[in-house]
Image (spheres, rainbow, N blue to C red):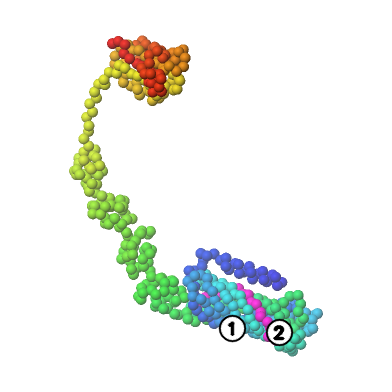
Amino acid sequence: MKKLILYSLLSLFITIISFPQNSITKHHAFSGTVMLGVEAGATIGFTDYANPKPEVLGRAVIEYFFPTTSAGILGLKGFFSGGYVAGKDDNKNPSEFRATIVRIGGGISYTFSIQEAVFPYVFAGASYGWVNPSDRNNVELPYLRRTFEITRENYHAEVGVRFLLSDAINLNVNIGGEFSPADNWDAQPASGGNDMLIQGLVGFSYSIFTTTDADGDGVKDGDDQCPDTPEGVQVDLFGCPLDADGDGVPDYLDKCANTPSNVKVDADGCPLDSDKDGVLDYLDKCPNTPAGVKVDAKGCPVDSDGDGVPDYLDNCPNTPKGVEVDAKGCTIEKEVIIIEKPAEVITLVLSGDTNFEFNKATLLPNAYASFKGIISTMKEHPDYKWEVGGHTDAIGSDSYNMRLSKQRAQAVVDYLVSQGVGRSNLTMVGYGERNPIATNDTDEGRSMNRRVEIKLLSK
């Protein structure tokens, strides 16, 4: 049974501290107050007697709550209580007992504020007290050590709820437990478990110092989240100056009332105009306009002629509509391009190193641009005859060089034909290493000898 009661108290404590935060107020009605209270109720004792009997208990309480603006508040609690604990057991002598208990003690409490009306709390503390066991006829029982004894410390735990009836008066309902390590309430030899009682109390308490209002704004100090409000300033329920437009600047300082929601304001509560163009930031489509520039209703620089260049940058105002202008707003003069007939190209030398894959007859992509001029001449004069001759250096055998020179010359002929040049106008010749244009004794000379030449044979 004792374990069940302890578990129930613990569960109630967890329920209280887990109460949803969105239902808790942002300040506390008991902040900085002293509270006096009286309570009465019943006890159930758990002693060496098998059958506990209900009895009565009364208690006087004084509490102090530390100043706070949060939903939870710490307090110090002192109490003086008197009452009885009783039990019955036919196997005991006497079969019934009724002990007078008197306690004086104190401890720490923690109280929540729920909508400023309901205040669940928890308390833990200790006490010293007196116990005087007697039988059911109030005859003192012989005690193991002496008939009247100051017990050692007793331990108290309690959970309860206060209901705010007015600014000063509270209704209190609580349930708690008291544990005695002395095990002497029933005048029986110590057994396996210490004496214990469960009490349930109901009472009233009165808060003093609840009408203090240091800044005179009509909100008591315990509720005032904005102390030192200037005299005469209108405040809300929390004692803070009103801010009707919610811009963070209280009404009594706000020079621009009714600012739209979420608009940034200065210290006077007025919307910002960062570039000082006369158009407020939240309306300005062109922020950071240079100082002194004339702007339109959207905060953008004026462009009188509509050419896309604002007036302050426009060196040519009044440009006709639709005329293309430069960055300075001036008309762009169209350049007349005279296409001249290209000169005839009658000779082309292609380097074998830069226009063919190494030791192959495959043209590289960068070679195609080299043909542009000579192809133009070939197409313009379809009666011209051309020779395409391939040449190599002296490295390698004669037969290999001859074959490679013919293959490269043929690759050029094939490309020219693919571009529209008549094949009958082209003669392909492979010279191998027979016609060097430089020495074959150096790398530079050999590179010059590796080539394909296109030259005009006849007109």
Mark sitting earlier along the chain (2/1): 1
| Residues at marks 2 and 1, CA–CA distance in whole angstroms | 20 Å
Instruction: Place residue 307 in its image quadrant.
Output: top left
User: Answer yes or no: do the residues labelled 2 and 1 have beta carbons within 8 Å?
Assistant: no
Please name the residue shown 30% across and 10% down the image: 458
Q: Is residue 159 above or below residue 94?
A: above
Secondary structure mainly formed by the magenta segment: strand
Mark 2 nearby-residue class (10 Å; few <14, some 14–19, many ≥20): many
Mark 1 nearby-residue class (10 Å; few <14, some 14–19, many ≥20): some
Q: Which mark is residue 99?
A: 2
Instruction: Provide residue 50's location: percent of width, then percent of height.
Output: 76, 77
Instruction: Provide residue 33's location: percent of width, then percent of height.
Output: 50, 79
Decide which of 77, 442 is in the foreground and name it.
Answer: 442
Position of the N terminus, as image quadrant, is bottom right
Instruction: Provide residue 179's location: percent of width, then percent of height.
Output: 68, 77
Please name the residue shown 26% across and 43% down the image: 308
Residue 122 seen in the current view: yes
SS of the residue at dot 1?
A: strand
Q: Is residue 1 above or below residue 347?
A: below
Which amino acid type is marked by label 1? Ala
Which amino acid type is marked by label 2? Ala
Farthest right residue? 91
Residue 383 seen in the current view: no
Decide which of 394, 110 is in the foreground and name it.
Answer: 394
Q: Is residue 284 above or below residue 68?
A: above
Tell me the magenta residue range. 149-166
Please name the residue shown 61% across and 81% down the image: 105
Question: Label 1 belongs to which residue?
Answer: 60
